Amino acid sequence: MSEVPPADVPKPLARVRGEPLLEPPQDLFIPPDALEVFLEAFEGPLDLLLYLIRRQNLDILDIPIAEITRQYMRYVALMKALRLELAAEYLVMAAMLAEIKSRMLLPRPVEEDDEEDPRAELVRRLQEYERIKVVAEALGELPRVGRELWPARVAVPEGTGEAPAPKVTLQDLLAAMAAVLGRAELNRHHCIQREPLSVRARMGEVLAALRPDRFTEFTRLFDPAEGRGGVVVTFLAILELLKEGLIELIQNEPFGPIHVKKSA
Amino acid sequence: MTRDDIAKVLEAALMASDRPLSLDALRRLFDEPAPARDELCAALEGLREAYAERAVELVEVASGYRFQVRRPWAARVARLWEEKPPRYSRALLETLALIAYRQPITRGEIEEIRGVAVSSQIMRTLLERGWVRVVGHREVPGRPALYATTRAFLDHFGLARLEELPPLPEVKDLEQLETRLAEVVEPRETAPQALEEARDATA
Amino acid sequence: MTRDDIAKVLEAALMASDRPLSLDALRRLFDEPAPARDELCAALEGLREAYAERAVELVEVASGYRFQVRRPWAARVARLWEEKPPRYSRALLETLALIAYRQPITRGEIEEIRGVAVSSQIMRTLLERGWVRVVGHREVPGRPALYATTRAFLDHFGLARLEELPPLPEVKDLEQLETRLAEVVEPRETAPQALEEARDATA
């Protein structure tokens, strides 16, 4: 973004609301080490797009698609280069922007009004998202019980009808623990998002440990020394491989050992 | 029971209760025949005035009446506890806002508007806090749950009804949109360049 | 800060607190230099008079000052609990269970297992009930507090020691999975070996 417009007669790069735009926006560079933090600040592709638009004081209705797309792609490329876990939604949006851009290059028949401007759908989504973003912020500013709102909690003198302390039995406790563990079981894949272990990498390892001509015992694929996280990742990798038809599972009798082999 | 006694019972109960009390709940504090609703309302109004000069005030929230600390003194009270409850994440607030302003709404619809997946943790947090509940199912394949906000949600934010939520910004006229879009001059660029970028993006 | 402001801060704090507040605790509500003790006492005396005609009164108990319902109205208030006996939320019970079975444990670890944020209110209730205490800090960034159960917790449940907690029910608990796996793959070399080979192969 260092090009300088010719000194004599500056040729506008674009017109924004009828005003000539002489210089490219200056605020597009972000140091790479700040990018990770920066990306966490975004709630998704729409949020990133809104940011790009707002940074240039543009109206949503006036998006220069070509320029915004270029900027958006630059972020996506950076994210890829830094191998940040890029949510699929960012790529979907990239594809959508690219499509809009290419459609806008096609000459549009003047009389045919029924075909919508390719930007319209995007603008509608941006606008709807922005409205929610605004009220979400306002909601975050509202006073809350325990922060700015303090209901009165006045005591009742002893022996006259004070609130009894809630009773808890051992059964309650046990049931609560069972519920937690039962749910933790269901939510395992959420916990491992933070683990440094990748399911993809483990899929490769599991696959490499298997042969198409011989069955391996299921339990041999797990290394208890890796702890809970490792066992879960291996398990997910096996499920994923199974789903993709890359391996086969066999169990000859109920409760019998499970065997795995690579699909032929 | 005199008028003043009625007011005293209400005052004592509202001060001691750990949740807001509705008119019905307040009526049940009395033996039959309990005071009529308008008697209760008059007594509540009297209480509100009696506390005009105090550090607490009688307010109405979604599920009833409660005494709470007046705002100017609230920050001081927060010092009683070491930790301040954290601010909510933007993801949680946006999800909550969509449920509040677009209820009833499915998780899929929330994801569509936000453009990203909604984490199960957020939905669980909202359900567990009792701010959101399932009010039915959309009759489409998969019968996804429809979410709506609860009175507890309004209570928590000190509101009596949904209309008291901050207003949604107005939508810009979509009919204008096409004309406005047509006016925007795209910077000139060559077709091959654009296509290349498009290819990069989708690669 | 004016005399009236001091009184208002005390009033607000005493109303919002669910335990009595000592003079020291009340002093900490103010920036340094905090009002002297006799200023606080004078303000408290003023409050006592201001509430002379109300259904609640300011009293001094062993551990400090508190507002409480005046005796004639207390029995009436008790009807609130008859109608709706206080109960702990599922969130609180699950948090307590995790502290009991997995102690010492940090709040973050509880949140990770439950998949939901634990509210400060819950921790406060458990600490105030005297069932849970901080036994140390985990030596990681932020030095989060480690929670464990107390003697009073065991007493409430009629247990002599923690080992008497009932064994966990048949849950397909991951830890069980781990132990079972360890049993199945007893010949130590097998499982790690298979993975090691695999890792070499993909390296």
Image (spheres, coloured by chain):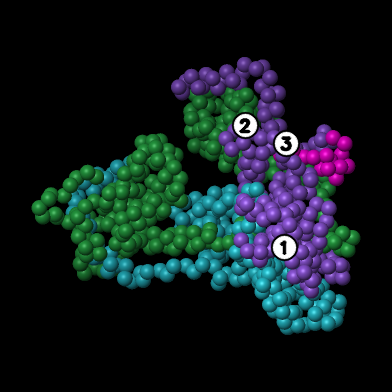
Chain colours: A green, B cyan, C purple
In the image, residue B45 above or below residue C147: below
Q: Position of residue B176 (x, y in %)?
A: 31, 71
Image check: C71 left or right of C123? Answer: right
Query: Which stretch did the figure color magenta?
Result: C147-161
Q: Pointer 2 and pointer 1: residues touching (CB < 8 Å)?
A: no
Same chain for labels 2 and 3? Say yes or no. Answer: yes
> A50 or C12, which lies in front?
C12
Asked if residue A115 can be seen in this view, the reply is no
Q: CA distance from mark 2 to mark 3?
A: 13 Å
Q: Please, which chain is the residue tagged with disc 2 on? A: C
Q: Where is the C terminus of chain B found, in terms of image quarters?
A: top left
The residue positioned 56% from the left and 70% from the top of the image is B164
Q: Which mark is residue B200?
A: none
Residue named by callout 2: C139
The image shows residue C76 at horizontal and vertical percentages of: 85, 70
| Of C7 and C78, the residue lying toward us | C7
Q: Residue furthest left?
A: A8
